[in-house]
Amino acid sequence: MRAASFYIGIVLLLLTSACSSVRSGGNRYVDTFYKGKGNILFHVNAFRLPSNKKNPDVVIDFTYNYTKDSTQNVSILFSLVGKQFIKGPYKTYLQQVAVDSLYLMFAEIRGRKYLTRLAGSIPFSTFDSIFQNSNIDFTIHHDKGLIDIQAARKWKKVAHHIRIDMLDVIRLTEAQ
């Protein structure tokens, strides 16, 4: 009976590992997943861009499916967390570059705060340039006005890790 349980456990382990991608690395800021020859999925983990009391905080994360000849955009997902529901239509800019194909994923109430989750995409060249700057300028136009968040202190640390853990890896891969 013990031997049968052992073998069932081994089979289940092999099945679950065979059906998923291989996580080749990760840290607090970037997770990388090997998806096959020349295909790497990068996920920049969510981080908070705090704002003033008047505006909601922004929690932002990115996903990029890298292939050597990739011209894909980088997916951007962000949440607005604040005391008011932020209705669309939305027009969002990162470093004065518009976020394309922006849409509302969902909105909900969490405790005493509203959570609005949005998704869109930006060209990889824009994504790369964002992380070369020492601060970030994130602007959202919505039905009640404008949210403008400029974060410098926390951004330097985040940008540094993303340059090392993702962008430098892509550059090294391109050079081969």
Image (tube, grey):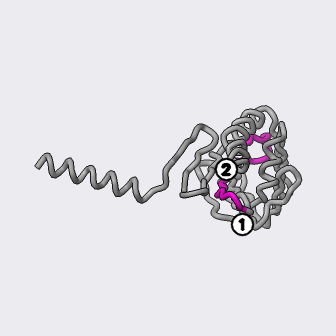
Q: Is residue 9 left or right of residue 97?
A: left
Which residue sits at x=68%, y=44%?
169
Seen at 66% across and 40% down, the residue is 165
Camera-near label (1 vs 2) is 2
Determine the secondary structure under disc 2: strand
Q: Amino acid at mark 1?
A: Tyr
Examine the structure image and report whether residue 123 is included in the region drawn in magenta: no
Q: Which residue bears the numbered disc 1?
A: 103
- At which x and y percent is residue 139? 84, 52
Q: Do callouts 1 and 2 mark residues in contact (Cβ within 8 Å)?
A: no
Q: Position of residue 159 (x, y in %)?
A: 75, 39
| Residue farthest toward the front in the current orientation of the protein | 176
Q: Secondary structure at mark 1?
A: strand
Tell which of 49 and 85 is nearer to you. 49
The magenta region covers 49-70
Mark 1 surroundings: few (<14), some (14-19) or many (≥20) residues within 10 A: some
Side of 59 relative to 15 (left or right): right
The amino acid type, in three-letter code, at marker 2 is: Asp
Left or right of 119 on screen, residue 28: left
Q: Residue at x 84, y 60 (%)?
A: 98
| Frontmost residue, 37 versus 152 | 37
Q: Earlier in the sequence, mark 1 or mark 2?
A: 2
Say which residue label 2 marks: 61
Question: Mark 2 packing: few (<14 Cα in 10 Å), some, or many (20+)?
Answer: some
The residue at the far right in this view is 96
Residue 66 spot, x, y in % from top left: 66, 56
Identity of the residue drawn at 78% across and 47% down: 55
176 up-or-down from 89: above or below = above
* Residue 50 included in the magenta stretch of the image: yes
Distance between the Cα atoms at labels 1 and 2? Answer: 15 Å
Q: At which x and y percent is residue 92?
A: 81, 58
